[in-house]
Image (spheres, rainbow, N blue to C red):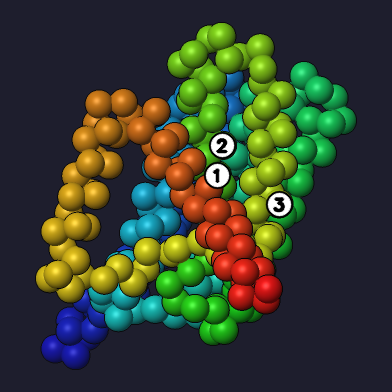
């Protein structure tokens, strides 16, 4: 009886890591698609990797199976799926046309993403639970994917592919910056906030349903702008107080 009862518990510990492994596999398939010139497929696979990445942590918390191994495995998965995969997409889509500049721009995205992950891992116990310091590497990866999807949808943008390289550099800097971004890990679900939250979520879902790529682009652009705007407002308030 004891062996039978322990099997569900053992599977519960394995389940979150299966989602993490799926994230790595999806990231690898994205890289293969980018090498083969299937850029839209590669971009959407990064989105899929993001879903798996979101599920592993939530499943671990729901089953109370969080472990140090799971944390480290998830971090390694992130560098593959949201560091190497988007960097290769950047290079194959635009970087190879710009020689060494393209190589450096693509490599910097991976390097700064690794720095972002390392800093997050050592600061987790010290950071506020409701904020990220610098944009998370999955967010940066998805923004790259969205840019490629937009450029593929609107052919007139493809002659400006250098913008993908330049923007990847900006994202790399935002990853290692001290700008704070909301993490949404602790959303307030109190009844008084539910109507507002539901309204916002329905509005976002409607826009994404009608215009999937443009909708995602709008949502992530607003998220990227939130940090610098919030920082600028806080600096302005402090400067007024000092006068």
Name which of mark 3 and mark 2 comes first in the sequence. 2
Farthest residue in the bottom direction? 2
Q: Is residue 150 above or below residue 66?
A: above
Residue at x 61%, y 14% (from the top left corner): 158
Q: Residue 130 in the image: x percent, y percent?
A: 43, 72
The residue identified by callout 1 is: 141
The residue identified by callout 3 is: 173
Q: For mark 3, give the secondary structure.
A: helix
How many angstroms separate mark 1 from mark 2 (CA)? 5 Å
- Which disc is residue 144 wearing? 2
Q: Quadrant of residue 94?
A: top right
157 to the left or right of 205 = right
Q: Nearer the viewer, residue 153 or 81?
A: 153
Residue at x 71%, y 32% (from the top left corner): 165
- Which disc is residue 228 wearing? none
Q: Quadrant of residue 196?
A: bottom left
Q: Nearer the viewer, residue 102 or 235?
A: 235
Q: Is residue 29 above or below residue 24?
A: above
In the rendered image, the quadrant that contains the C terminus is bottom right
Name which of mark 3 and mark 1 comes first in the sequence. 1
């Amino acid at each position: 009886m004891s062996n039978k009862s322990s099997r569900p518990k053992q599977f519960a510990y394995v389940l979150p890591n299966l989602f993490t492994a799926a994230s790595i596999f999806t990231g690898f398939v994205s890289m293969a698609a980018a090498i083969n010139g299937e850029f839209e497929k590669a971009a959407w696979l990064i989105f899929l990797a993001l879903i798996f990445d979101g599920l592993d942590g939530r499943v671990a918390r729901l089953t109370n199976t969080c472990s140090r191994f799971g944390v480290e495995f998830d971090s390694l998965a992130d560098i593959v799926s949201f560091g190497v995969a988007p960097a290769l997409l950047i290079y194959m889509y635009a970087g190879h046309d710009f020689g060494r500049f393209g190589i450096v721009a693509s490599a910097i995205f991976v390097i700064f993403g690794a720095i972002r992950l390392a800093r997050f891992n050592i600061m987790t116990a010290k950071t506020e639970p409701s904020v990220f310091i610098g944009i998370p590497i999955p967010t940066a990866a998805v923004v790259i994917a969205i840019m490629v999807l937009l450029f593929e949808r609107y052919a007139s943008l493809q002659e400006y592919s250098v913008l993908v390289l330049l923007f990847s550099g900006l994202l790399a800097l935002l990853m290692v910056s001290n700008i704070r971004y909301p993490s949404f890990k602790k959303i307030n679900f109190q009844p008084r906030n539910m109507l507002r939250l539901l309204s916002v979520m329905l509005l976002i879902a409607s826009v994404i349903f009608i215009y999937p790529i443009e909708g995602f682009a709008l949502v992530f652009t607003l998220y990227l702008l939130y940090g610098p705007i919030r920082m600028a407002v806080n600096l302005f308030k402090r400067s007024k107080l000092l006068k």
